[in-house]
């Protein structure tokens, strides 16, 4: 009997212990779940961010426009000795830019220039632009500009010739993909982030080239991982012709967000610094940056040195200025890596007038975002802009009738000299209308007397709008252009 009591006592104690242990385990599970839910609401999951598909820069181009562009390029290549070996239409992430693999070790790209580009089919402009690209290639070993460029005036296409880089770009290296594969297939998943040693090495090489471009006054705000070619573990900056074409940048959305969020810092910062920060984010996380808000996804396991750099570049606080290219180059994180070459080449100087004008205009286009978002969202800014333009027009109209002959002649000569620069000025004036006869046309009837118009400008406008061409006499001509037999 005592033995039974002992057994029951042991069983009771074991049951109570099991129940207590179960309660403790349940409490621990509930606490862990609450912490996880709190972390999810406080910070987005990195895995969800990394598994998202990398969006293209613009909406996809229609099939009809794509076929027309391909046909135009094929017709252009018929005038050359090159032949298309393979169409690489969707290699890059910029819709409207297509690549064609030629026979041999060459590839060409075709992209339409923007409406604000000063490049054209004029021989002097084409020669100056080719000279700029050739000088960039010969003056710095870490730049990879096109070997030749050409323009198709009718379609607005810029054709750029390049040598194939078989290793691909920095983004291809990040995703372990082949350069000739389609964009959607290559970057469908997040890439493998680089080590801290490679981040410092590649970053210093890119900053090394950006420093030279800055000292030479060459604009380049199209920096991203797809435009950095890698060969033998050395980075080369490519697509140096894009700043002259006035096309949207890869990080245009990031530029606009930075301008809206940090207007004081945006007024002083170099856009190449913002591009470099977005590129550093991509190669340290494995996914392209499309918005400044993606800094919240930065993983805890990543390099704290890189995180601090990204905070300095993309999230300036208070009166702290964004670091310059030179300051980033001398940062201890990048200073630990060796320079790609021993001595930095001297800055390049351009003496040709047309070359200087092209670089000056490209510098102006790339100094800020192409479409300033502050003018879109601020109705007062739009209203003030309209009032300024109206007052400017009214002032011009009021001074047109009172200008002296010397002023009018000087203004006409100034307009004539401003159009003498080929390809850089506005569109030429329309030619005079053709006439069917060589005889002189009689002069039009004299204008009505000034007393009928009055002194107010409204009377002049009413006389112009009320003009009836049916009251004019028909001109009598004597056509003698027929051949005499």
Image (tube, rainbow, N blue to C red):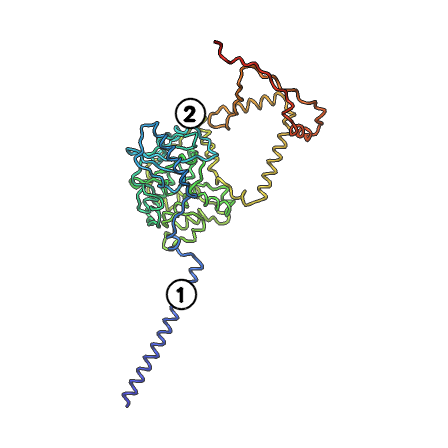
**Residue under the image location 36 percent in, 39 percent down:** 89
Q: Residues within 10 Å of mark 1 (few under 14, many from 20)?
A: few
Compared to 88, does 39 lie above or below?
Answer: below
Q: Position of residue 325 (x, y in %)?
A: 42, 41
Tell me the number on the disc at residue 407. none
Q: Position of residue 239 (x, y in %)?
A: 38, 36
Residue 38 quadrant: bottom left
The mark closer to the camera, 1 or 2, is: 2
As helix, strand or loop, the secondary structure at mark 1 comes to helix
Q: Is residue 285 left or right of residue 400?
A: left
Q: Residues within 10 Å of mark 2 (few under 14, many from 20)?
A: few
Give the residue at the far top of this rendering.
485
**Residue under the image location 63 percent in, 32 percent down:** 394
Give the residue at the far left of this rendering.
3
**Residue under the image location 36 percent in, 76 percent down:** 20
Q: Is residue 318 left or right of residue 341?
A: right
Q: Position of residue 392 (x, y in %)?
A: 61, 33
Residue 413 quadrant: top right
* Labelled pair 1, 2 in contact (Cβ < 8 Å): no
Q: Position of residue 342 (x, y in %)?
A: 32, 37
Give the residue at the far bottom of this rendering.
1
Towards the viewer: 1 or 248: 248
Compared to 27, does 483 lie above or below?
Answer: above
Q: Which residue is mark 1?
A: 33
Q: How far separated are the C-alphas under marks 1 and 2?
A: 70 Å
Q: Which residue is mark 2?
A: 123
Towards the viewer: 404 or 341: 404
| Quarter the N terminus occupies | bottom left
Q: From where the camera sits, is residue 200 visible? A: yes
As helix, strand or loop, the secondary structure at mark 2 comes to helix
Number of marks in the rendered image? 2
Q: From where the camera sits, is residue 326 visible? A: no
């Amino acid at each position: 009997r005592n033995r039974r009591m002992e057994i029951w006592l042991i069983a009771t104690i074991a049951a109570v212990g099991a129940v207590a242990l179960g309660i403790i385990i349940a409490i621990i599970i509930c606490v862990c779940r609450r912490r996880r839910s709190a972390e999810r609401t406080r910070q987005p999951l990195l895995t969800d961010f990394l598994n998202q598909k990398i969006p293209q820069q613009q909406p996809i181009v229609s099939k009809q426009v794509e076929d027309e562009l391909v046909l135009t390029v094929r017709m252009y290549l018929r005038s050359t000795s090159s032949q298309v070996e393979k169409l690489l239409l969707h290699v890059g992430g910029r819709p409207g830019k297509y690549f064609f693999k030629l026979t041999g070790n060459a590839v060409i790209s075709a992209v339409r220039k923007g409406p604000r580009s000063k490049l054209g089919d004029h021989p002097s402009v084409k020669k100056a632009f080719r000279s700029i690209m050739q000088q960039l290639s010969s003056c710095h070993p870490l730049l990879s500009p096109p070997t030749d460029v050409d323009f198709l005036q009718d379609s607005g296409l810029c054709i750029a010739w390049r040598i194939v880089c078989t290793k691909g770009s920095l983004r291809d290296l990040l995703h372990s993909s082949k350069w000739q594969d389609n964009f959607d297939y290559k970057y469908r998943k997040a890439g493998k982030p680089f080590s801290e040693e490679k981040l410092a090495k590649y970053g210093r090489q890119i900053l090394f080239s950006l420093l030279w471009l800055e000292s030479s006054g060459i604009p380049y705000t199209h920096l991203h991982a797809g435009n950095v070619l890698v060969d033998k573990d050395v980075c080369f900056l490519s697509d140096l012709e894009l700043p002259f074409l006035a096309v949207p940048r890869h990080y245009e959305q990031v530029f606009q967000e930075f301008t809206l969020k940090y207007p004081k810092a945006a007024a002083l910062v170099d856009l190449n610094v913002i591009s470099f920060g977005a590129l550093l984010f991509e190669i340290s996380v494995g996914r392209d940056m499309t918005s400044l808000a993606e800094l919240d996804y930065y993983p805890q396991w990543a390099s704290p040195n890189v995180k601090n750099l990204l905070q300095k570049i993309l999230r300036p606080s208070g009166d702290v200025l964004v670091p310059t290219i030179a300051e980033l180059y001398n940062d201890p994180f990048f200073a630990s890596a060796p320079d790609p070459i021993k001595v930095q080449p001297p800055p390049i100087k351009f003496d040709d007038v047309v070359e200087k004008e092209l670089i000056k205009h490209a510098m102006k286009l790339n100094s800020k975002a192409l479409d300033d978002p502050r003018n879109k969202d601020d109705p007062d800014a739009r209203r003030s802009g309209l009032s300024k333009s109206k007052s400017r027009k009214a002032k011009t109209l009021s001074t047109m009738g009172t200008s002296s002959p010397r002023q009018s002649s000087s203004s006409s000569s100034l307009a004539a000299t401003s159009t003498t620069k080929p390809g850089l000025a506005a569109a030429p004036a329309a030619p005079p209308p053709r006439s069917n006869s060589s005889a002189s046309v009689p002069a039009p009837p004299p204008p009505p007397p000034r007393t009928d118009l009055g002194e107010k400008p409204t009377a002049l406008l009413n006389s112009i709008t009320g003009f009836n061409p049916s009251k004019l006499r028909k001109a009598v001509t004597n056509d003698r252009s027929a051949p005499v037999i």
